[in-house]
Image: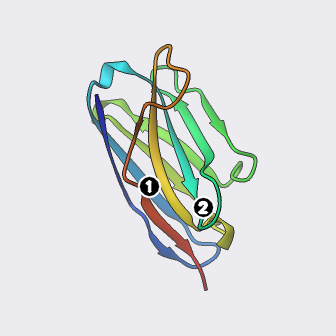
């Protein structure tokens, strides 16, 4: 099993920045991809960004390209999401998730961290 703990959420004004962290523990070697998702009130959870654990290949949702950057620190078993130029529509609970090798979906999820963008 993999345990995930997110941190770094908070409230920020439009145009501001936040950095989220997701620390993984447990069966780290089983991780192939780590990703961030978000869920706004009344909406379905949506993909934000992902990174391949070994090769560092990144994928972004169109809505965050050019504003958000996903990165990883393998030594710390931690993935980050740097969020710049934040907009009110970025307000959501952000979740970290992992996908194992050969797994069709994301297997483990964190508890989520709230991000609020408001003036």
Q: Is residue 80 left or right of residue 92?
A: left
Considering depth in this image, is 113 or 119 the residue closer to the camera?
113
Residue that protrudes farthest toward the left in the picture: 26
Q: State the quadrant of the C terminus.
A: bottom right
Q: Position of residue 61 (x, y in %)?
A: 70, 44
Q: Position of residue 26 (x, y in %)?
A: 24, 30
Report the residue at 52% width, 45% height from top.
36
Q: How far apart are the alpha carbons under marks 1 and 2?
A: 11 Å
Q: Nearer the viewer, mark 1 or mark 2?
A: 1
Q: Are marks 1 and 2 in contact (CB under 8 Å)?
A: no
Q: Position of residue 109 (x, y in %)?
A: 41, 42
Q: Position of residue 52 (x, y in %)?
A: 52, 26
Report helix, strand or loop for mark 1: strand
According to the image, label 2 marks what residue?
84
According to the image, label 1 marks what residue?
20
Considering depth in this image, is 68 or 47 the residue closer to the camera?
47
Q: Is residue 102 left or right of residue 6?
A: right
Report the residue at 41% width, 55% height from top.
112
Residue that protrudes farthest toward the front in the picture: 42
């Amino acid at each position: 099993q993999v345990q995930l703990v997110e941190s770094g959420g908070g409230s920020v004004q439009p145009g501001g920045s936040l950095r989220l962290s997701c620390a993984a523990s447990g069966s780290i070697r089983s991780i192939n991809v780590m990703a961030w998702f978000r869920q706004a009130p009344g909406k379905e959870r949506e993909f934000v960004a992902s990174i391949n654990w070994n090769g560092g290949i990144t994928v972004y949702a169109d809505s965050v390209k050019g504003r958000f950057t996903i990165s990883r620190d393998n030594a710390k078993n931690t993935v980050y999401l740097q969020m710049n130029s934040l907009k009110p529509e970025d307000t959501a609970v952000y979740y970290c998730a992992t996908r194992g090798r050969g797994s069709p979906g994301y297997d483990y999820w964190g508890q989520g961290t709230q991000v609020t963008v408001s003036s």
